[in-house]
């Protein structure tokens, strides 16, 4: 929807984010029967140099053929995201952004650093709220992914029933298929059904390579492309582009993430109300007590 203040400042994105977070918290708590202990919003801030160097076409095609109206809309959208980033801490929400870093990499680093800094008696659980399928590779016993568009909570236990493959084979499935949303081509002819059948039969990439002489792979016109020089180059490239576990350099953002983890957030009630009034978000103000209660109920995780 198009929202703006009386003096012409666009607020659609601001309203959308500030209005949706409490809903996401409630959904997660109901789906998993847990109490959310911390809210972290993570932003893309430029394309990853390693990925664009490896594959200049990475995420190519985005925002092409823009009209002047599109360009203005996008600039105003970016202005709104900066406002959101600066003001989320008023609600006790940590907002994470680092130049040249993509949200995928920061989230992966955040989870790993939380695990490393966790006290012996703590049992953290991580719920990633995103429509980006790349995060499904991070599903484990302590990490879930909730898709707010599909309204599906993917967990380690239900992933096979919901997606049709084991969570540990999702990365291989993704590498073989590619990712249209990031302009990453896969092996020609391998789509959803073929990709799932491949990993269900042969497992992860290492297992597929060990079985490269299997008749089902050798005799298939499509699957045999995996082992051609071009196919092997594609698989290697896609793995380096998509694989978070093996190719994200945690040291690039470790200090920033560690400092962010250690910050104890709090809700600044009066400043939050003033912010909503300044941006004339009247529908949130009308339900303010209920809306702010969600943020106040979230207990901070704090590492000494």
Image (cartoon, grey):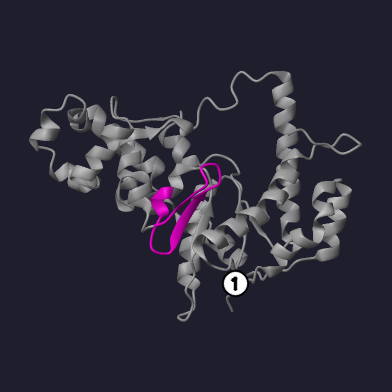
Q: Circle 1 is placed at which residue position?
A: 301
Image quarter in which the C terminus is found:
bottom right
User: Along the horizontal axis of the image, is 156 left or right of 301?
Assistant: left
Magenta residues span 136-155
User: Along the horizontal axis of the image, is 93 left or right of 141?
Assistant: right
The reply to whether residue 52 is visible in this rendering is: yes
Return the residue nearer the eye: 219 or 58. 219
Task: Give the residue drawn at x 29%, y 48%.
Answer: 169
97 w.r.t. 119: above or below: above
Horizontal and vertical percent position of residue 141: 38, 63
Residue 71 among those drawn in magenta: no
Horizontal and vertical percent position of residue 200: 23, 44
Task: Give the residue drawn at x 40%, y 55%.
Answer: 139
Residue 143 among those drawn in magenta: yes
Horizontal and vertical percent position of residue 68: 73, 19
Task: Give the residue drawn at x 70%, y 44%.
Answer: 16
Q: How many discs appear?
A: 1
């Amino acid at each position: 929807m198009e929202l703006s203040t009386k003096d012409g400042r666009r607020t659609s994105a601001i309203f959308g984010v500030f209005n949706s977070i409490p809903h996401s918290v409630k959904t997660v708590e109901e789906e998993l029967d847990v109490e959310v202990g911390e809210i972290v919003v993570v932003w893309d801030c430029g394309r990853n140099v390693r990925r664009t160097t490896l594959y200049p076409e990475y995420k190519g095609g985005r925002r092409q053929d823009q009209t002047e109206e599109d360009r203005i809309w996008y600039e105003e959208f970016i202005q709104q995201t900066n406002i959101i980033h600066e003001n989320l801490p008023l609600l006790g929400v940590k907002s994470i952004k680092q130049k040249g870093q993509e949200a995928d990499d920061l989230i992966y680093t955040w989870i790993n650093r939380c695990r490393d800094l966790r006290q012996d008696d703590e049992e953290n659980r991580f719920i990633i709220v995103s429509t980006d399928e790349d995060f499904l590779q991070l599903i484990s016993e302590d990490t879930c992914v909730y898709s707010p568009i599909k309204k599906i909570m993917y967990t380690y236990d239900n992933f096979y029933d919901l997606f049709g493959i084991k969570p540990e084979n999702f990365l291989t499935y993704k590498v073989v298929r590619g990712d249209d949303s990031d302009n990453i081509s896969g092996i020609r002819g391998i789509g959803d059904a073929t990709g799932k059948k491949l990993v269900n039969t042969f497992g992860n990439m290492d297992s597929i390579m060990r079985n490269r002489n299997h008749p089902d792979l050798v005799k298939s016109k499509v699957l045999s492309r995996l082992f051609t020089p071009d196919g092997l180059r594609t698989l290697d490239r896609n793995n380096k582009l998509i694989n978070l576990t093996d190719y994200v350099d945690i040291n690039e953002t470790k200090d920033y993430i560690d400092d962010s983890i250690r910050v104890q957030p709090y809700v600044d009630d009066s400043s939050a109300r003033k912010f909503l009034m300044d941006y004339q978000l009247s529908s949130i103000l009308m339900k303010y007590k209920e809306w702010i209660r969600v943020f106040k109920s979230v207990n901070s995780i704090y590492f000494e």
